[in-house]
Image: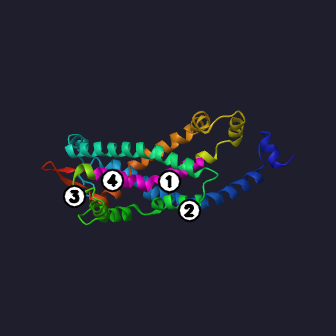
Amino acid sequence: MSAQTSVVAGQKAPAAFVRRERIRYRWAYLFILPQLLFFIIFTMYPILMSYVYAFYDWSGFGPLSNFVGFDNLIKILHDEQFWNAFRNSLLYMAAKTVILMPATLIMALILNQAFFKGKVFYRTVYFLPVVTTTSIVGIIMKFIFGNDQGLVNELLMALGILSEPVPWLGQAGTAMLVLIFVGSWKFFGMMMVYWLAGLQSLPGDVYEAAKVDGASYWQTMRSITLPLLMPVAAVILLLTVVNSMHVFDLVKTLTNGMTVLCDGNRRSVHL
């Protein structure tokens, strides 16, 4: 009986076989080691140290010497700017999710049709913002929305929609709208690809059976496509929520932080 058969049968594997397996898997660990080191240094260590820094009055430089316990937590819970930023973060996340979930599904359904021409071109166009650096997107959009001679103001005034320029990034309401629009535009292609992957994984024989039974497109959509897409929809929803909370780079480059003049007071739009 071979060594492999002995292992399957539950018997003790020969020492030579175990040694060979350990050597083979050792190479696998060696190839994983660089990625593991980068993950520990640049992901796990900063996450763990952020909890440590929370208990110190620390400027970001020098040793950790002034331990303050939970004072930082108590202070931030009574900070109006923190709660304002928290509300704005939730508003941004909710608006982006409500817009993207149905819009990207509709576009994925269109691109998934067999008769639709130019699928690869449109998928590429919609996915380009995803691979573009967020800071670059923020800087470009700042020039488009951020001044009186911006492209949006010039276009709307030329069409007669506006009589004077709108400070899109100069007031809280419009600044949030611009953030939601830009964030949704940038993540649109990623969500659309997720929906396309879900649609293309659905079993074709179910649709053939529905077609034989005389089901219309909308009946098939309501009774087959949408129910089968629910697990994929749950994953996409989770990814959208997580992505919406990682918006610092876009806010920083687009609105510089952002503190704007609102109702006579300096008020944080988003932190």
Is residue 17 among the parts visible in the rendering? Answer: yes
Measure how far apart labels 2 and 1 are at the Cα level: 15 Å
Residue 179 marker: 4
Is 188 magenta? The answer is yes
Q: Residue at x 28, y 42 (%)?
A: 87
Direction from residue 205 to residue 130 in the image, left or right = left
**Contact flag, marks 4 and 1 (Cβ < 8 Å):** no
Q: What stretch is highlighted in magenta?
A: 175-197
Depth-wise, is mark 1 or mark 3 nearer the camera? 3
Measure how far apart labels 3 and 4 are at the Cα level: 23 Å
Amino acid carrying label 1: it is Met
Amino acid carrying label 3: it is Ser
Depth-wise, is mark 4 or mark 2 nearer the camera? 2
Is residue 271 among the parts visible in the rendering? Answer: no
Q: Percent from the top left, x then y, of residue 163?
A: 22, 58
Earlier along the polypeptide chain: callout 2 or callout 1? 2
